[in-house]
Amino acid sequence: RFRDQLQFVEADIYQYIERRLSPRLRRRVDAADVLQETLLIACRAFADFERRRPMPFRTWMLKTAQQQLVQVRRYHLQSQRRSIGREVGDDHSTALLHASLALSASTPSRNLMRAEAQQSVVAALNRLAEIDREILFMREFEKRPYEEIADICEIDAAAARKRFGRALLRLRLELKAAGLLE
């Protein structure tokens, strides 16, 4: 039964994980490894999920993937090995932004202007709370419904809507202050 449902969502779960792995974390772990661990955890918890059915299967899998990503980040940040916090790179939210802002430019000066604007946007996003960045990306880039976002973030749908609206307003104010919006 788990396998039957998984075939419809596995690619989406992989993309969800892939988009959220920061470049510095990718040096230590592969999205396929996180997916495999997510599937193992979900398979073990599937009987309980079937009994309770707290949310749609796809949403439950996304939430499980989100929890596994948190565990992977925590493990690598707290490990006795070289801290990934000291490595140069971006967090998962800014990695998504870099991908979305990657546009070709025809001159070196345009490249520089675009890079400076991108850095300002990344800095503005990083000033948002992590949950607000996640909600913003899930809604704007992944086009997820508020109900699914709410389930993944463990808040209600009304709170997800409010957080999204407030995050947009804060981002707009930050970008105006940086001179990127009028």
Image (spheres, helix red, strand yellow):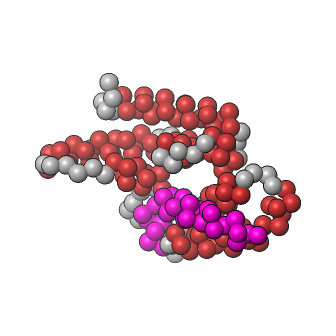
* For residue 54, side relative to residue 11 (left or right): right
**Is residue 14 on the magenta stretch?**
yes
Residue 101: image location, x then y, percent: 34, 48
Above or below: residue 120 compared with residue 78:
above
Q: Which residues are magenta?
A: 1-28
In this view, the residue farthest toward the top is 182
- Provide the major secondary structure of the magenta segment: helix
Which image quadrant: the C terminus? top left
* For residue 57, side relative to residue 170 (left or right): right
* For residue 42, side relative to residue 95 (left or right): right
Depth order, front residue of 97/1: 1
Which image quadrant: the N terminus? bottom right
Depth order, front residue of 2/25: 2
Residue sitting at 85 percent across and 56 percent down?
A: 52
Asked whether residue 75 appears in the rendered view, the answer is no
Depth order, front residue of 12/4: 4
**Is residue 175 on the magenta stretch?**
no
Residue sitting at 67 percent across and 60 percent down?
A: 61
Residue 77: image location, x then y, percent: 55, 65
Residue 158: image location, x then y, percent: 68, 33
Residue 27, quarter of the rendered image: bottom left
Residue 164, quarter of the rendered image: top right
Residue 149, quarter of the rendered image: top right
Residue sitting at 29 percent across and 41 percent down?
A: 117
Depth order, front residue of 126/61: 61
Residue sitting at 42 percent across and 55 percent down?
A: 95
Residue 157: image location, x then y, percent: 68, 37
Above or below: residue 90 compared with residue 43:
above
